[in-house]
Amino acid sequence: MDFNKLIARIKAILTTPKTEWPVIAAESETVAGLYKNYILVLAAIPAVMGFIKSSIIGYSLFGITARASVGAGITQAVLAYALTLGLVYVVALIVDALAPSFGGQKNPVQALKAVAYSYTASWIASIATIVPAIGWLIAIAGGIYGIYLLYLGLPATMQAPREKAAGYTAVTVVLALILGWIVGLVVAGVGGTAALTGAAINAGGGSVSIDKDSPLSGLEALGKNMEAASAKLEAARKSGDADAQADAIGAVMGAALGAGGKVEALAPDQIKPFLPESLLGLPRTEISAERNGAMGMQVSEANATYSDGNRRLKVELVDVGSAKGILGMAAGFAGVERERQTANGYEKTYRRDGRLIEEKWDGNRKRGEFGIVLGNRFSVKVSGDADSIEQLKSAVTAIDLAGLERLKDHGVSKG
C-alpha cells in the first residue's frame, strides 16, 4: 500500500471532490484492491475510536461516567470493524442494482468506489467522537458531508444523469441508514451497552513522514500485510485447493485486523490453567472457558469466580487472537494518562512498562477493578470485593502474567 497516495486521496476527496471524482472514476481498480489499499485502513478508524471512547474515556451524564470493560470494548470494536467491512460491500451492491433505475450503468467496481470514497468523511470524522461535548456534532457533520460526496460521485462513477443524482442518492442513503442502524443494534447488543499522532503532512509537496513508533505506522504496516495476504489468497484461488483457500482467507482476515497474518487464539485448555484454584485466600467456585471464531477470526475467553460466601472476586481473561493488531493500535491511539477523583474513590488509566492498565475503586462499597493488557493481545481483569485496590492488584499479580505474555505470538502464522 502506498501511504502517500492514501493520504493524498483522502485530502483530495474531502477538499476538492468535484475534480477528484472524475479521476477516481477513470482509475482501473478491483474490489480486492479497493479493500486492501483504502477501505480496510479507513474502516478501522471508527472501530479504534469506539474502543477508546467506550473503554478508556467512557460516557458521562449527570456526573456519572460509565465505561465498558476492556474485554467488552475489544469485542465491540472487532465486531463493528468486521460488520463495517461487510456493510460497505452490501451498500455497493445496492448502488449497483439501483443504477439502471436512475439512468446509470451497472458496474460493481465503480459502485464500490462510490460507496468507499463517500464514507471517507464519516470515517475521518469519527476521530472526533472522543472529543467531549462537540464530538458528536463533528461526527454528524462528517455523515452529512458523506451524503454530499455520494451525490457528486454517482454521476461520475455510475454514469447517472446529473438531474437524477439527487433521487439516486436519497434512495441509497435511506437503505444505507437502515443497514447501519441494524449493524449498530448488533454491536450494541454484543458489547452491552485524537488525532492521528506521529504523522507530518506537507500539504504543498504532498509528502508524508511517519514516526515508526506512532499508531499511523501500524496502519501502514497493516496495508503491507494485506498485500502479502491478498497475494496468497489469489494464489490459493488459482490452485483450486479448498484447504489452502480457507487458510488464505484466515490470513487475509488476520492481516485486516492488524495481526499480520492468521492467528489461532488459545484453546480453552490452554487459557484455563491461568485461572488459579484460589485467589487472595478465596476458593474458586466457578470456571469456564471458550473459543469462538468466524471468517478466520478467533477470540478466546476464560472466567472464574472466587468466593467464601462473604467476599466475591471475578477474573476475566480474554485472548483477542486475530484482533491483536487492532488492540495494539487502539492502545497506541489511547497513549494518554487519565485520572478522575470522586468523593468515594477514583478511576484512572495509564501505561506502565508498555502495558495499558485500568484501575477503578469505590471506597464506600469496598469494591473495585484492576485490569491490564499484555502483549497487545491478552486482557486480564479482576473485579469485586476487597479491603483496598492494592488487594486487587495483588490478585492480578498472583496470576501468571509473565507466562501469559510469553504466549503473545502463539498461534501466529505469517505465511
Image (cartoon, rainbow, N blue to C red):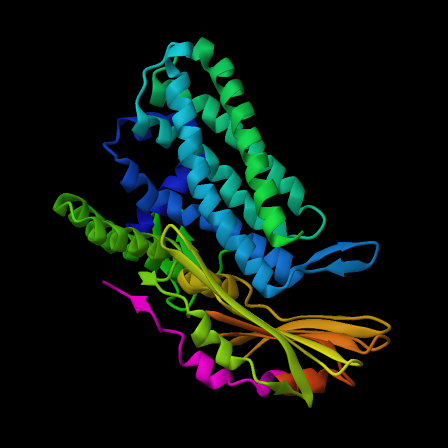
Front residue of this view, candidates 287 and 88:
287
Residue at x 57%, y 84% (from the top left corner): 276
Whether residue 389 can be seen here: yes
| Residue 29 located left or right of residue 142 | left
Q: Identify the residue at the far left of this view.
A: 239
Circle count:
0
| Residue 349 located left or right of residue 262 | right
| Residue 358 located left or right of residue 367 | left
Residue at x 23%, y 32% (from the top left corner): 28
Residue at x 36%, y 31% (from the top left corner): 112
Q: Give the magenta-colored segment's residue range.
A: 396-415
Residue 309: say if magenta. Answer: no
Front residue of this view, candidates 220 and 307:
307
Across and down, in percent, residue 109 comes to 30, 29
**Picture quadrant of residue 34:** top left
Residue at x 39%, y 65% (from the top left corner): 211
Quarter occupied by the C terminus: bottom left
**Picture quadrant of residue 410:** bottom left
Residue 282 vs 22, above or below: the answer is: below
